[in-house]
Amino acid sequence: MTAPPTICGPGATVSDGELDPGWRMRRDRFLRRTDERGDLTASIAESRAARISAGTFAIAGLALVSGFVQGGLALALEPTASKLSFGIASSLTIALALVTAGLALRAKATAVGRERASERLLLLVLLIGLAAVSVAQALNPDKCNYVAGWLLFAASISAVAALVMPWTSVQAGTASLPAFAVWLVALFTIPNAGQDSVARMAIGLIGLFAAALPIGLGFLTERRFEEEEERAALSREVSHSRDELGRARIVHEAMFREPLCEGPVEVQYKYFPLREIGGDFVHIVRSPCGSRVTTTVIDVSGHGLAAALTVNRLFGELERVVAEAKGEITPAYVMTQLNRYIYLTMTAHSMFATAACVQVDTDARQVRWVVAGHPPPIVRLRNGKTERLDCTTLVLGASPPELFDPEECSRTLNVGETVIIYTDGAFEARSPAGERFGLKRLEESVAFDPPPRDFPTFLANLVARHHEGNPDDDLLVAQITFKGGSRSVAVE
């Protein structure tokens, strides 16, 4: 994985064709994700509005059924007054159902408007039905129990309405309780020769339970909506954090310089953070004369955002060190400056770093290195054998600047030989059974014959196959190859 090219100067731009494809893909994916509404709040509101719309029509349908039933009773009853009461109730109920459905169909109708209309429709249907049965029973006190029978009708339609509408307990109570209260009054005041006071008390208690049913259903609905709102709030926080990490990753990866593909020294690398961003970093510098290429790999303690913020600070320090030295740096100088910076600014916060700084000098045909508590880089010789560039000093930040000794080492580097620098995510990777990949297996992989052109990808694939998609650390692998040839390349 490579980083985008550095953009220098105010207002400088880089065309999409000049960007690394992998980085451009991540940038475009982030921009698409930012534009999309990942918030659950909108989807919850849309779902609730759809349910209100469907529930409104369902209640209108129930009202229509109620109106037709009342019309049937009007035709079946004998007393003219009873016929008239049920006929009027039927006409009013059907008219209200049709009006409510028509209002709900309006394009300008809102979810709140439909919700209120359905509440009013249910209450009116219950009251109109209650008025009809009250008149019929008052006219025939010895022959019917219409008021008591209304309870079954009211309980059924109220429960169904509370199920199909996303009402809260208050809304369900508003739509049905007034009708049940009037019913209780009618139950005890309208004469009924077939019921004594005990029977009416029993029916009244049943009515109380029936009145509580839609309120209980509304309470369950309310709890469900509260849980959905909590999930939506959590989703907003997760989405916000993800977007922030996406932006941070774009900034973080902009610090990684382009691999060197021209000149006598080739440097390429692959970086796989455990999370969106991590604490591994590689810094590549070619000297102004073009004969020396310095590659520094840093592994900050910890993972994630805290480690990435530390890397950002170290990147700034490295840029300062290189700029002040005008590119003429040595591994010992780089490590001395990094140790001083970390000791003075980060040690108090228990932040340390391991690092390996490797410089290839094409004129002297040498490789110079300082390894500060970092896993030893591996040199693959032309004959296929490997050698380690052993550790030379302490972890950065562990020693005061005046006591820090980088102890720079050097050896001959022939054309065609390769230096592999890696972080501990390579050899400490564990298989599902708990087996480490190990430094020995890593050395054997570097000695693989025939050698791959792209060691970072080759080694990263081996490590990924070992841990089977369950990494537990950041992974960075850098390959430095001495190709020989002309050194006349452009130096930025």
Image: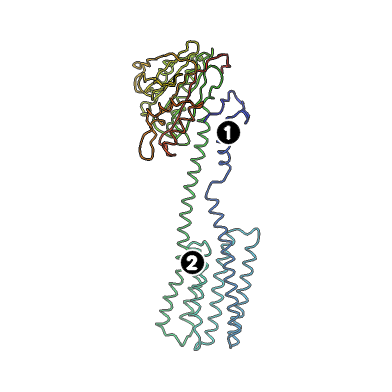
Identity, as a three-letter code, of the amino acid under mark 1: Arg
Q: Position of residue 412 (x, y in %)?
A: 44, 13
Q: Tag 1's secondary structure?
A: helix
Comparing labels 2 and 1, the label whose residue is closer to the camera: 1
Q: Residue at image x 48%, y 24%?
A: 479
Of the pair 57 and 424, the residue shown nearer to us: 424
Q: Position of residue 15 (x, y in %)?
A: 63, 29
Please give left or right for residue 308 compared with residue 10 in the image: left
Q: CA distance from mark 2 to mark 1?
A: 57 Å
Of the pair 378 and 101, the residue shown nearer to us: 378
Nearest to N terminus: mark 2 or mark 1 = 1
Q: Give yes or no for contact between labels 2 and 1 (Cβ–Cβ under 8 Å).
A: no
In which quadrant of the rendered image does the C terminus lie? top right
Identity, as a three-letter code, of the amino acid under mark 2: Gly
Q: Position of residue 60 (x, y in %)?
A: 59, 68
Residue with the mark numbered 1: 24
Residue with the mark numbered 2: 173
